[in-house]
Amino acid sequence: LDEKLYERAMVIELRRRGHKVDAQRSYPVFYQTELIGHLAPDLIVDGKIIVDAKVVAAFNEAHVAQMIGYLAISGLELALLLNFKSARLEWKRVVRRQESESDVPDLRA
């Protein structure tokens, strides 16, 4: 089945269970001060979690990178990748890493 069918089914089921679901919420993307486009995660559940449906043989680095981008642009902390390809649901949790001062290189000369 198509990813969009799973996405629509998840919206219906999550809402039936009392969750607030935003589908394809658009976030502006800027380079410096210029708007360069928009990103739209599949679902945002309860204003806290990005959920993205996939129908792929296996998750790859591009899928994870996409979730990291969505987390960065939305300001959210957690994303779930769900893979409906197999008879058994596969999932991957992606957490936005918080930068600490030790993570930022000192560029002072």
Image (spheres, helix red, strand yellow):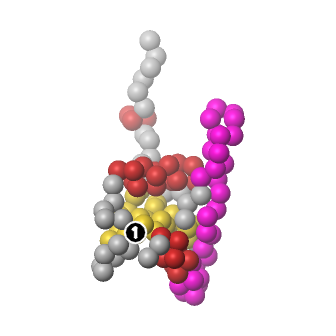
Q: Which residue occupies the extreme top position in the image?
A: 109
Q: Which residue occupies the extreme bottom position in the image?
A: 16
Q: Residue at x 44, y 76 (%)?
A: 1
Mark 1 packing: few (<14 Cα in 10 Å), some, or many (20+)?
Answer: some
Tell me where residue 20 appears, x and y as whole percent: 61, 76
Residue topped by disc 1: 55
Tell me where residue 83 appears, x and y as whole percent: 37, 69
Tell me where residue 6 appears, x and y as whole percent: 48, 76
Q: Residue at x 31, y 75 (%)?
A: 86
Q: Which residues are magenta?
A: 11-39
Determine which quarter of the picture holds residue 18. bottom right
Determine which quarter of the picture holds residue 55. bottom left
For label 1, the SS is loop
Above or below, 48 relative to 73: below
Q: Quadrant of the C terminus?
A: top left
Residue 85 seen from this side = yes
Tell me where residue 47 appears, x and y as whole percent: 59, 66
